[in-house]
Image (cartoon, rainbow, N blue to C red):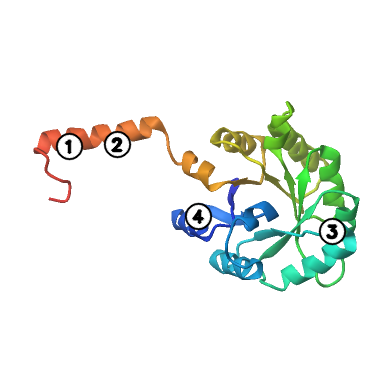
Amino acid sequence: MVQIFLDSANLQEIEEALSWGVISGITTNPSLMSKEAEPFELLVKKICSLMQSNPVSVEVLSTVAEGMVKEARHLAGQAPNIVVKIPMGIEGLKAVYRLNRGEEKIPCNVTLVFSVNQALLAARAGASYISPFIGRLDDIGWDGVGLVREIVEVFSRQGINNTRVIAASIRHPRHVHEVAAAGAHIATVPFSVLKQMARHPLTDIGVERFLSDWARARGGEGIGH
């Protein structure tokens, strides 16, 4: 079953989504973190505490391997459920490889993936997760969901079982449906999309009709009376 992660750094959104019982992790990025008033490290710790043992992806800011590794080790020390987001690229691959070796084995989520080749390299370097950005591909006329499908198929044929595919940059509920059908392990969604997923106009009409029928039959009497 596809897992749903929330793509957010907002504590209120996270708490609300958790109360629904449907999310299994959190992804953040520097843009999302910059919108929040809390100091960075305090916010990271609060999010990780809310999520308990579920994974929370937090991104490094460095663009060179040495800096990424240093940041990753610092982030991993903030909470046991931290997953370090590393941008795809040669320096990112070096960092993931180093973080996956030895005793520390810090889990990494390689982000900004836009091709099967990038996904293969990230998996080979030791990424625990890879995040193809489907919405950004759609924006330039490419098939984002198609990329997810291709990555899942190639990973299956190649026996790559230790790297999970997170469909990211999701724009609307249809994307979630499509990446689930394509075999993505995880879809990470903004809170606005999560709310849309729970709703359908026919559901709203149905609820209104049931309540109207009940009120008409009972003369406005509530169900609990």
Identify residue for label 2: 207
- Distance Cα–Cα, label 3 vs label 1: 60 Å
Identify residue for label 1: 214
Q: Can residue 15 be seen at all in this image of the molecule?
A: yes
- Distance Cα–Cα, label 2 vs label 3: 50 Å
- Distance Cα–Cα, label 2 vs label 4: 25 Å
Q: Position of residue 27 (x, y in %)?
A: 64, 54
Of mark 4 and mark 1, the one earlier in the sequence is 4
Mark 2 against mark 4, which lies toward the viewer? 4
- Distance Cα–Cα, label 4 vs label 3: 30 Å
How crowded is the residue under tag 4: few (<14 C-alpha within 10 Å), some, or many (20+)?
A: some
How crowded is the residue under tag 3: few (<14 C-alpha within 10 Å), some, or many (20+)?
A: many
- Distance Cα–Cα, label 4 vs label 1: 34 Å
| Amino acid tagged 4 | Glu
Question: SS for tag 3?
Answer: helix
Question: SS for tag 4?
Answer: helix
Mark 4 against mark 3, which lies toward the viewer? 4
Q: Position of residue 91 (x, y in %)?
A: 89, 54
Identify residue for label 3: 96
Q: Quadrant of residue 10?
A: bottom right
Of mark 4 and mark 3, the one earlier in the sequence is 4
| Amino acid tagged 2 | Val
Residue 202 vertical placement versus 193 (above, below): above
| Amino acid tagged 3 | Val
Q: Residue at x 18, y 33 (%)?
A: 213
Q: Position of residue 135 (x, y in %)?
A: 67, 36
How crowded is the residue under tag 1: few (<14 C-alpha within 10 Å), some, or many (20+)?
A: some
Q: Residue at x 80, y 48 (%)?
A: 160
Identify residue for label 4: 13
